[in-house]
Amino acid sequence: MKKKSVLIIDKQKNMLNIYKNMINWDDYGYEVLAIIDNEKAAISSYGEYLYDLIITDTDLKEGNGLSLISRIKKIQQNVRIVVISQDIDYETVRMAMKLGAYDYFAKSKLRYSDFITLLNELNAMDKNEPSNDEDELQRLMGLIRDKQKIDENRILKAIDIEKYPLLSQPYQMVLFRLDHVWNLFHTVISKEDKEFLHDEVRYELEKTFKDIPYRTLLFSKKHSGIVLIPPTDIEILKNKAKTLLHNLESGTGYTFSLTISTPVHGIDAFYQQYQKTLHYHNWKFYDGDNSVCLMQDKDDFNNLIQSDLSLLTSQLLKINIRELSKTALIKEEILAYFNLHKINPEQVITYFNDVLLMIFNQHYNIQKLRSGDIDMMFLVLSKVETLTELSQYMDQCFNQVAHWLFEDNSNKYKKNVNKILLYIEANLDKKITLEMIANELNLSEIHISRMFKTETGFNLINYINEHKMERALELMANKRVKIKEIALNVGFDNQLYFNKVFKKIYKVSPSIYRKGL
């Protein structure tokens, strides 16, 4: 009989061992599958696995238990959630129960008998419910793919040698996975389409490998899994892989990527080889969608040396709406470094995650007001699968952050001053005069000058010139553009006057500055 799954959510990782060892979960038909320390990851994991029982604290590393209960109940109303927390105040208990918690315990008073009573109650309620016949090995494979720590002995125990006889002999793994699965499953593919996708993938796999004896198909999810095959000539596998990818795209309308492992032998090798094949599947990050990775032809990834990027990182942190083109160039230089050195894709994603985190930490007001949007930004970033996708998504992120910063800065000023700032940003390529701004706002020149100085602390003409010169610096990075052309592009039809303003601000002439680039 299949055991019921348990998810533990607690910021104290040591609580996993405490909960696991407090009773023999097997005796009551349950097993602890995963422990997570924050709300966002818990929601994502639950949406994927729909655990039978959730045990959560109210105080989490990120987010909180009460919000977690509310969000999970929206996914599955009937899920059993038990709160075990240091907080035992009446209001917290009342809110937890109101949101749908099944029970509530204080950590300091928790005893093994409490768990026994709880599980007996739940089993009595579930007595007449139908069981789930999902294959245990395939379920554990899905958890490993999602980076849950699964004991190797559980994998060995789940392998039925009569069902999977090939695992007692030499074999290879062909790992298949739908490209951009998270984005597709959350925005495009319906529940009915998932079933169709699963059936179509199974059909194409069976058709492709039908001439290979003892082949075994294992799905870890409806969209991904492995085909176990005896060691096969690599040229034959290359041709089959090419045909399979073409047929999958034709049959489903979506692209897939494959990783073909090196041969191994025996049940004992399964766990490590599956993990290794998943790891090498990350070469798709550099090879792109609809790709085939041959493990025998690939080296492992290199580790990121943070000091190599310290200067470029510091430049990224200076993001603002006026220099988004410069930010994009810096980002591309960083991505070129990652591509050249083939840095571990997980470290690449972590790098940009940390960059965004540093930016938000510098601007607490944005972090406070945009917490939901920021959480989603980090979540989507964590699901990026290729270097090309990362480049495009980071452009979106930096653009959004720059606008948040500009809006936050604009909120400091009155409406008319914000109109002045926007007018200047939109017209840096023109000759901007006080008269033009005054006409735009239908105010006098004297009034707008005094108002701007009072609100911002800057002389309006000086502010305009400084921002024009910042734009000029960006243009100077391209040495094919003449200084005269740069002057015209920032609204100066007189190059001598442009030179004078530039030197007043940067203490050197434009030509000398460019020689130093």
Image (cartoon, rainbow, N blue to C red):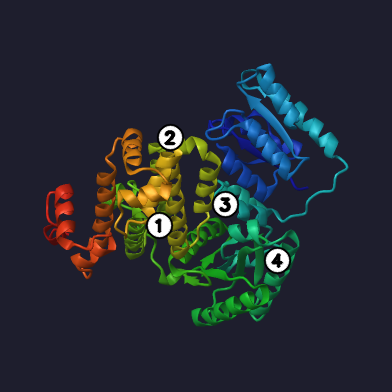
Q: Is residue 104 visible?
A: yes
The reply to whether dot 1 and dot 4 touch (C-beta < 8 Å) is: no
Residue 301 in picture, x, y percent from top left: 38, 60
Residue type marked 1: Asn
Residue type marked 4: His
Residue highlighted by disc 1: 344
Residue type marked 3: Asp
Q: Secondary structure at mark 1?
A: loop
Residue highlighted by disc 4: 198
Q: Which is nearer the N-term, disc 3 or disc 1?
A: 3
Q: Nearer the viewer, residue 16 or 322?
A: 322
Q: Is residue 228 above or below residue 73?
A: below
Q: Residues within 10 Å of mark 3 (few under 14, many from 20)?
A: few
* Cα–Cα span, label 2 and label 4: 45 Å
Residue type marked 2: Tyr
* Cα–Cα span, label 3 and label 1: 17 Å
Residue highlighted by disc 2: 364
Q: Locate residue 135: give its quadrant.
A: bottom right
- Rendered image: mark on residue 146: 3
Q: Is residue 362 above or below residue 171?
A: above
